[in-house]
């Protein structure tokens, strides 16, 4: 079983050349584990081959093609922005911030909705006295008696009641006997 | 202005400030490694190039989502891998027969051997052949293991960066690399033991 240090030294050798003391360590491992020398050679061969493994480069104009696509996308974005600004300039100047215009539109529509809502509520509830009075059928201002006339309303009612309570037969009998 | 020494994070900041020239520098920096990764996953050089273009466009569009405290290298490779995986899934749903499949395997593989200057012609030929064999054996390795191994060996990414790209733990990443290497070693051993390809040739 090759020690862990062997693997560590192999990993170090992938990043940089081994130092003198690390070579000494490696030699000690080779002496202690004779198979490790062949394995080291195999590993280093593998590293060497993997380093040499290379595919052909991409086309030279690949970057140019990407840049061309990016520029086209940027131009499309600019055109889209300009069309939005043109639309907004119908309401305000182009250099004004869009947020301010948006806020103004929002407040305007909010107040409109509030006003419409208030009017509708008002019509349904009918709290306006003038509206209520005019909406009652068959009653006009001329039919309503003045408050002065109605001041003795209770006394008049009472006197009418008193008149009903008088026993006219008894009074006539008394008058005939006299 | 020379931007070749500028760090990735500085370039990203400049692109965010509207400097598209910095994006050109970033593309020059990453086009080869990402193309290689895409090729290894898709195994089609033309598709790999198309995917490279898609990856760069996605990087540009999503640059605002990149967090500067992270590694840009890991971020761009993650986008590249996810784009390739999407392409692989799309192909499974709608398999397309490429015209390249009609050509022989050896013609199709665009492997190249680099840095031959100090070796004699015989060694070069042997090494070319072994690299070619390795490239073919590499296709047998599962995608995750292959990607982990190549990011580690060829792009020199750290275990931490690879684990973020693959979406697994550092331990799992080490295990993927180890298993990929073991698979390659076992499959290459018969060639190495033939005598012609002595390990000393490559040391």
Image: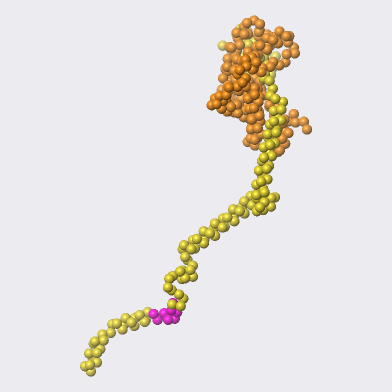
Chain colours: A yellow, B orange
Residue at 51% across, 59% down: A117
The extreme left residue here reads A177
Place of residue A162 in the rendered image (x, y in percent of width and height, measured from the top left):
31, 82
Residue at 63% across, 11% down: A42
Residue at 70% across, 25% down: A59
Q: Is residue B171 visible?
A: no
Q: Nearer the viewer, residue A36 or A79?
A: A79
The extreme top residue here reads B195
Place of residue A114 in the rendered image (x, y in percent of width and height, measured from the top left):
54, 58
Seen in the picture, residue A84 relative to A2 is either above or below; the reply is below
Seen in the picture, residue B122 relative to A76 is either above or below; the reply is above
Which contiguous range is marked in magenta?
Answer: A144-153
In the displayed structure image, the side of residue A144 where residue B114 appears, left or right: right
Q: Quadrant of residue A81?
A: top right
Residue at 59% across, 56% down: A108
Q: Nearer the viewer, residue B158 or A74?
A: A74
Instruction: Report the quarter where the C terminus of chain B lies.
Output: top right
Place of residue B16 in the rendered image (x, y in percent of width and height, measured from the top left):
69, 37
Place of residue B62 in the rendered image (x, y in percent of width and height, measured from the top left):
63, 35
- Membership of B82 in magenta stretch: no
Seen in the picture, residue A120 relative to B85 is either above or below; the reply is below
In the displayed structure image, the side of residue B12 where residue A116 appears, left or right: left
Q: Quadrant of residue B39?
A: top right
Q: How many marks?
A: 0
């Amino acid at each position: 079983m090759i020690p862990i240090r062997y693997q560590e030294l192999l990993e170090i050798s992938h990043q940089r050349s081994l130092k003198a003391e690390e070579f000494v360590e490696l030699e000690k491992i080779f002496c202690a584990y004779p198979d490790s020398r062949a394995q080291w050679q195999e590993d280093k061969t593998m590293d060497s081959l993997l380093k040499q493994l290379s595919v052909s480069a991409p086309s030279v104009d690949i970057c140019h093609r990407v840049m061309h696509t990016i520029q086209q996308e940027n131009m499309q974005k600019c055109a889209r922005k300009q069309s939005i600004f043109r639309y907004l300039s119908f309401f305000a100047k182009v250099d004004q911030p869009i947020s301010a215009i948006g806020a103004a539109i929002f407040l305007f529509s909010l107040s409109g909705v509030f006003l419409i809502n208030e009017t509708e509520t008002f019509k349904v509830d009918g709290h306006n006295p003038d509206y209520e009075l005019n909406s009652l059928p068959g009653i006009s201002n001329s039919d309503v008696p003045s408050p002065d006339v109605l001041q003795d309303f209770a006394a008049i009612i009472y006197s009418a009641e008193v008149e009903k309570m008088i026993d006219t037969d008894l009074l006539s009998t008394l008058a005939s006997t006299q | 202005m020379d931007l070749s020494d500028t760090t990735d994070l500085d370039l990203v900041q400049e692109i965010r400030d509207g400097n598209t020239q910095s994006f050109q520098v970033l593309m020059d920096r990453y086009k080869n490694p990402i193309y290689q990764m895409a090729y290894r996953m898709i195994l089609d050089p033309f598709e790999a190039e198309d995917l490279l273009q898609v990856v760069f466009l996605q990087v540009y569009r999503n640059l605002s989502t990149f967090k500067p405290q992270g590694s840009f290298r890991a971020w761009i490779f993650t986008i590249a891998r996810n784009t390739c995986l999407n392409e692989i899934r799309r192909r499974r749903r709608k398999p397309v027969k490429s015209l390249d499949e009609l050509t022989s395997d050896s013609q199709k593989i665009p492997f190249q051997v680099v840095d031959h200057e100090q070796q004699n012609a015989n060694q070069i030929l042997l090494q070319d052949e072994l690299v070619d064999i390795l490239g073919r054996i590499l296709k047998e390795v599962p995608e995750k293991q292959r990607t982990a191994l190549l990011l580690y060996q060829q792009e020199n990414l750290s275990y931490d960066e690879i684990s973020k790209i693959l979406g697994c733990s550092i331990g799992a990443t080490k295990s993927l690399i180890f298993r990929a290497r073991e698979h390659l070693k076992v499959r290459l051993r018969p060639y190495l033991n033939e005598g012609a390809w002595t390990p000393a040739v490559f040391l």
